[in-house]
Amino acid sequence: MTEAGSNRAGPLTRLWQWLKEKWVRDVPEDLALCEFDCHKAQCFEGEWDTCERRLAHASGGLASIQRRQV
């Protein structure tokens, strides 16, 4: 096999990379806190705007909120 041929990705690798680009996205930081670190399954409309955890995280004070809840 030539060097040029060994550097090309196979069709399955290219397909996997394409699918990964389409399906896997980074979660925005402000939503990641809610999606992965919150005990609530879902917020009511308007709760997100006044969420103490989200606002504390945005201001850099989430560590104190987490200590207080334990």
Image: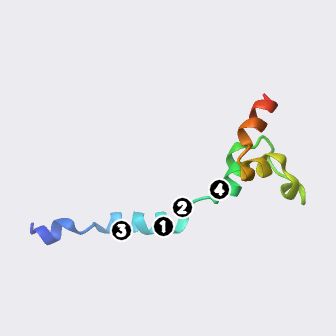
Residue 45 point in image, percent of width and height: 89, 60
Which residue lies at the image location 82% right of the left edge and 51% below the top edge?
A: 42
Instruction: Tell me which amino acid carries mark 4.
Output: Glu
Task: Kindly check if marks 3 and 1 are in contact, taking CB atoms under 8 A apart as contact.
Answer: no
Residue of label 3: 14
Quadrant housing the C terminus: top right
Q: CA distance from mark 1 to mark 4?
A: 19 Å
Which residue lies at the image location 39% right of the left edge and 68% below the top edge?
A: 15
Q: Residues within 10 Å of mark 2 (few under 14, many from 20)?
A: few
Q: Is residue 39 above or below residue 13?
A: above
Q: Earlier in the sequence, mark 2 or mark 4?
A: 2
Q: Residues within 10 Å of mark 1 (few under 14, many from 20)?
A: few
Instruction: Tell me which amino acid carries mark 3.
Output: Arg
Task: Tell me the number on the disc at residue 29.
Answer: 4
Residue of label 1: 21
Q: CA distance from mark 4 to mark 3?
A: 29 Å
Q: Which structural element holds mark 1? A: helix
Which of the 4 quarters of the picture holds residue 47? bottom right
Task: Kindly check if marks 2 and 1 are in contact, taking CB atoms under 8 A apart as contact.
Answer: yes
Residue extending furthest toward the top: 70
Residue 39 point in image, percent of width and height: 78, 40
Which of the 4 quarters of the picture holds residue 30? bottom right
Q: CA distance from mark 3 to mark 1?
A: 11 Å
Q: CA distance from mark 2 to mark 3?
A: 15 Å
Q: Earlier in the sequence, mark 3 or mark 1?
A: 3
Task: Kindly check if marks 4 and 3 are in contact, taking CB atoms under 8 A apart as contact.
Answer: no
